[in-house]
Image (cartoon, rainbow, N blue to C red):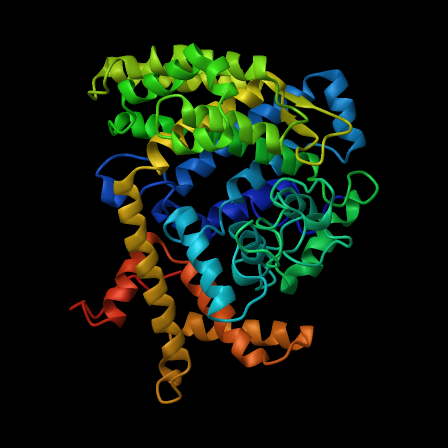
Amino acid sequence: MRRAGSTDGLAASPFRVDRDRIVASPFFARLAGVTQVVSSAGSGLLVHNRLTHSLKVAQVARGIAERLLATPAAAELLRTLGGCDLDVVEAAALAHDLGHPPFGHLGEEVLDRLARERFGLADGFEGNAQTLRIVTTTDVRGPAGAGLDLTAAVRAALLKYPWTRLDHPHPHPKDAAVPPRGAGEPPDAPGTGSLKFSCYRSDLEDLVQARAPFVGLVADTQQTVEASVMDTADDIAYAIHDLEDFHRAGVLQHTTVAAELGSWLDGALDLAALPTADLVARVHRPGHSLEALRRRLHAKDSWVVDDDAFAAAVRRVHAELVDGLLGVPFDGSAAAERAVAAFSGTWTERLVGGVVAVADPHPRTGHVTLAGQQWHEVAVLKFVHHRFVLGRPDLALHQRGQATLLTALVEALRDWLTDRHQRSRLPSRLDDLVGLAYDEYRVLGVDEPERLAVGRAVIDFVSSLTDAQAVAMLDVLSGRSNYLWTDSLVL
């Protein structure tokens, strides 16, 4: 059986029931208040949040699946690998970011550091693992009262990184000669386990059960077909819509992006001959950052990197982004909006059209992946975003403030939990999470389950807040707010 679960609800298909439960979950609704890259509350602009991102990923994922299933050879291959159901793909895409904490990836990094260093949680925090925890454990809207009672197929499709941080499966993928994407340890934190993973140790039984129908069909460290479709769609949506946002905001400047791409195209041979030390020393000069990207791709993904394809990708992005979209500043006019829509539509169609199914994928990719040329184009599009948005000092200043806020909130809640005089007045949800975590750690037979339960409960609680709720709760706990009633406890 590829599925487990009931068919209650408005739909006859259990996979449609899964989709309906996900959409009805308050964890899904909260994504409207969770940062994608920058907070819409702080930017004053209509930028993507985690909810609108998830909706676009679902749209792209279903389009990929429909296209592959309409190709007889691809459809037959997918069938032998466990199948590709459209509703499973869509449900997984809608749910894939449920575990993202306030303030996007910055929040993920902060909570992981606090979980490991302040609370001694070996698993730390990881947004993908938190997603599995939500749908199997901490969401209480399912018929069983714990999790959403999703089918095995949908749970398996959520597992982008089907391993725990440290010890499952054995041998662990972090120790492989060629680790799968995300499985390697952070270079600045050796011994901490995989950088990316989709399951905490406490939820391992759910991972094993969800993957059981696919044993012998896909490798232990490979995504299911439906997870691979979702992951590819996530890459495509991310590569395109963040560029839209920052073009609207006027952050992506024609001159600087044109100088970077144009300088590399004009001087590619000279840049390729530069010693690494010289390249690093001059990385802020036009063209040098893009050359550094080319070298990183060779170092990490030599199985697919091709210099001719890379150069073609730079030329295409230059023509369609620099000469096209950025050629005219965004002014809010109908013509400007049409230009953004045309850019998004053209690139979505091109990238979805470049998705292929492969029987024997490289460890760093999946059974459903981008063809070589489109893979390079996504790498270049993401580079533009990282180089000219994420690297901005003003965004870094904003994010340092958010990191300080999250750290203070976690510390304040920990102090409350360990205050024996005030423990009885905890928010009910936080108290429930402590009890849940304690039971899990006691079953696992770990030392000091009470101490670990406090840490996991605080991390679970804070990660389930929206950006605004995190700010409001710290204002209340620090005495800066004059309001007695806030939405800071709602979920």
Left or right of 33: which side holds 76?
right
Q: Give the number of marks.
A: 0
Q: Position of residue 485 (x, y in %)?
A: 23, 67
Q: Nearer the viewer, residue 32 or 404?
A: 404
Compared with 353, 89 (above or below) is below
Compared with 43, 375 (above or below) is above
- Let me know if residue 199 appears in the view: yes
Q: Position of residue 113 (x, y in %)?
A: 47, 60
Compared with 443, 219 (above or below) is above
Farthest-out residue, right? 216
- Position of the C terminus, as image quadrant, is bottom left
Q: Position of residue 437 (x, y in %)?
A: 56, 72
Residue 372: name its quadrant. Answer: top right
Residue in the picture at 28% in, 13% down: 327
Q: Nearer the viewer, residue 404 or 35?
A: 404
- Position of the N terminus, as image quadrant, is top right
Q: Nearer the viewer, residue 166 or 98?
A: 166
Q: Position of residue 444 (x, y in %)?
A: 68, 73
Residue in the picture at 28% in, 41% down: 393
Farthest-out residue, left? 482
Residue 89: name its quadrant. Answer: top right
Residue in the picture at 32% in, 41% down: 38
Residue 68: name its quadrant. Answer: top right
- Let me know if residue 354 appears in the view: no
